Image: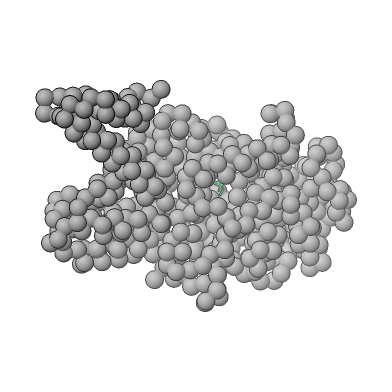
Amino acid sequence: MLKLYNYLSRKKERFRPLRPKGTVGLYTCGPTVYDYAHIGNLRTYIFEDILRRALVSFGYRVKHVMNITDVGHLTSDADTGADKIEEGAKRESKSVWDIASFFTKAFLADTRKLQVLRAHILAPATKEIPSQIKIIKQLIRRGYAYETEKAVYFNVPKFRGYTKLSRQPLAQQRTGARDEVIVDGDKKHPADFALWFKLVGRYKNHVMRWDSPWGPGFPGWHIECSAISTKYLGQPFDIHTGGIDHVTIHHTNEIAQSEGAYGKSLARFWIEGEHMLIDSKKMSKSIGNFYTLTDLEARNFDPLAFRYLVLTAHYRSRLNFTWDSLKAAQLSLKRLHDFVHELRAAKLKNNARPHRIFKNADKKFFDALANDLDTPKALSVLWQLVRRYRNTPKDFDPKLVLKLFLKFDTVLGLNLEYKASSITKRSALVENLAKKREGYRQQKEWAKADKIRSQLEKLGFTVEDTKGGYRLKKLPPT
Ligand code: AMP
Ligand code: ZN
């Protein structure tokens, strides 16, 4: 039985899909594509990927939708400051469209390296302007939104239940609220937030602009998620996810918009991932205390070592990033890859008596995942199995251990199979060639032996003759 912590009720609840035999609708808030994602952002996408893979492993079909924020996200999460995309364009001296396209590609490249499955629907906000206008019109019609000279706003006090996700009193909810009063004196309540910005004041020269019933302008950040989720998943849908920093403003506003517009709940489960910290502070672009995946690769870390590190912490715990912990994760991942490699090479043991052990490990692994995605526990099941195999290898059929590991890997996404097979194929070939050469050498067939030596060199190995036979050595990379 799958249980997930629903942030709305602050309880672990049994997960049952809204449509019992249907597809599970999963919505994840996507990146703002004005810069590279930092590894804190990537932690959130990895946790969401584990959720999706776990749902599939429990037999659900999943439809995964993600937005790409390429307009309207201001430098403060509240409605103040400049549009992040327009700022990014200035910084890089590129057009806003080029910036959005470049960093969308960078985001997809990073997540691909981390084995994060791509959303079935990836929807950039700039491609969904008509559906955003549609929902704003609906909000005006239902009395939840109003227009001023500068913008169209959501009228927060009108929507009862505005604080149901955050559970924060309204007065405390919006730190930026007072500044905004100065920005637009016509706002009815300081917590009211913009749905549509008009091209006035600091936004007079905003490059990304569209016509609307309220004049040319651009949408606020929150409205895209309401428009996109409702369009592709309907309302309500099963699960909405994101980082915990979005609870007080972004997710809260999404709920207000979608529920205000259509009078139905937005999503059944709200699953919020905790932060990645650095020196015990939240990793964030604004503080500048962050690393990107490229920074990790530059120090010779495998992106999947970072994925492994993320899995060692529960998604609802904070995770303090250190280079030492990443080093330890890389070592553990290498050990797992070596172990799978060893299993592939091992011979079948006739006296293996595996069934109970396998069944237990299988059950424990998926029970851990079913208990609110307890990945640290799931990893510990894996390691217990490694230890038992190492202690009493004759008790095990290595092919069955391998099969189980690869089943676990469909959720963990650590690429155990690919690495194993490429390493195995290559080393088996090298080993065979070296043996063949040794045979020729013993028969004094020097020409044939030399031919194999050059073949081995092409594969990056040199062979040295020793008293007892030969020794293979890896050549330095050219
Ligand atoms: P953004 O591109 O700023 O909208 O953020 C993308 C995702 O990363 C959102 O789900 C955020 O909640 C999440 N996020 C931002 N900072 C962190 C962090 N330090 N640790 C984990 N997730 C984060
Ligand atoms: Zn969102």
Q: Nearer the viewer, residue 311 or 446?
A: 446
**Residue 219: percent from left, percent from top:** 76, 50
Query: What residue appears at the point 35 percent right and 46 percent down from the top-left corner?
Result: 421
**Furthest-bottom residue in this view:** 20
Residue 322 visible, this orientation: no
- Which quadrant is the C terminus positioned in? top left
Q: How many callouts does the rendering have?
A: 0
Q: Is residue 159 above or below residue 449?
A: below
**Residue 333: percent from left, percent from top:** 33, 43
Residue 351, picture quadrant: bottom left
Q: Quadrant of ligand 1?
A: top right
Q: Nearer the viewer, residue 247 or 117?
A: 117
Q: Is residue 426 left or right of residue 82?
A: left
Q: Nearer the viewer, residue 163 or 254?
A: 254
Colour mode of the rendering = one colour
- Which quadrant is the N terminus positioned in? bottom left
Q: Is residue 298 left or right of residue 380?
A: right
Query: What residue appears at the point 62 percent right and 69 percent down from the top-left corner?
Result: 236
Residue 135, picture quadrant: bottom right
Q: Is residue 345 above or below residue 288?
A: below
Q: Is residue 417 left or right of residue 446?
A: right
Q: Is residue 468 left or right of residue 5?
A: left
Query: What residue appears at the point 65 percent right and 37 percent down from the top-left corner?
Result: 102
Query: What residue appears at the point 24 percent right and 48 percent down from the top-left corner?
Result: 345
**Residue 189: percent from left, percent from top:** 74, 54
Residue 358 visible, this orientation: yes
